[in-house]
Amino acid sequence: MTTALLIIDMQQAMADRIAKGRDCANPEAGARIATLAAAFRARALPVLHVRHHDPDPASSFHAGKPGAAPLPCDAATEGEAVFIKSTSSAFASTDLAAYLKREGIGRLVITGAVAGFCVTSTARAASDLGFEVVLPRDALLGFDLPFEGARLPAQTILQVTLATLGADFATLTTTEALRSGL
């Protein structure tokens, strides 16, 4: 069974949120993702890219807007598949599942943004489709959320997300443990 690295939504809009001071868990996730991508490439393992393009022209994720551009950690090299999605899950609006099956990929190391949204949707869908899911918890970007007139801290949102996904949908690990175990 082939293992692939899946990088989700590491686009300029994420860096813009951090630069504006938004509460963020794992602001160094991009560097860790770059480390994992280099390790996968060194072992000739697939690195796959998923980018969000919102059909709303006002969205910072609208194709052609600066926010939709990939961050350096998500720069695809020649031959790497790039999937463009318009939904939360990378499976719902792309042919990702068919691609993975065709390529014999059965295990996905999912990284990227945002842990509580697109990463969660993708990890759950992958698990439901029979793929083994691995989440390096320090290579996932998370942000705070409003709730009942207050803001829940990014770290709290990330911990709850990981607790839920780790309970039934994925194996949790770290970048270093994963990199050294490839």
Image (cartoon, helix red, strand yellow):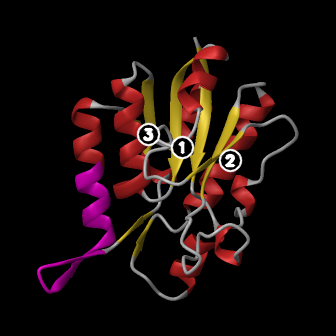
Choose top left, top right, bottom left or bottom right for residue 66: bottom right
- Residue 135's label in the rendered image is 3
Is residue 173 at all visible to an observer of this figure? no
Where 4 sits versus 13, above or below? above
Q: Which residue is painted at 47% across and 61% down in the image?
A: 141
Q: Is residue 174 left or right of residue 165?
A: right
The residue identified by callout 2 is 35
**Residue extent of the magenta highlight:** 145-161
Mark 3 crowd level (few <14, some 14–19, many ≥20, 10 Å Cα): many
Label 3 or label 1, whichever lies nearer to me, is 3
- Inspect the magenta stretch and tell me whether residue 158 lies in it: yes
Q: Is residue 4 left or right of residue 106?
A: right
Q: Measuring from the top left, give residue 110's x and y in whole percent.
A: 51, 40
Distance CA(mark 3)–CA(mark 2): 15 Å
User: Mark 2 or mark 1, which is nearer the start of the sequence?
Assistant: 2
Mark 2 crowd level (few <14, some 14–19, many ≥20, 10 Å Cα): some
Q: Which residue is painted at 39% across and 18% down in the image?
A: 130
Label 3 or label 2, whichever lies nearer to me, is 3
Q: Which residue is painted at 33% across and 70% down in the image?
A: 154
Distance CA(mark 3)–CA(mark 1): 9 Å
Is residue 24 at all visible to an observer of this figure? yes
Asked if labels 1 and 3 touch by Cβ distance under 8 angstroms, the answer is: no
Q: Measuring from the top left, give residue 122's x and y in whole percent.
A: 43, 41
Image quarter hosting the N terminus:
top right
User: Mark 1 or mark 3, which is nearer the start of the sequence?
Assistant: 3
Q: For this rendering, which residue is in front, 181 or 115?
A: 115
Q: Measuring from the top left, give residue 54's x and y in whole percent.
A: 55, 64
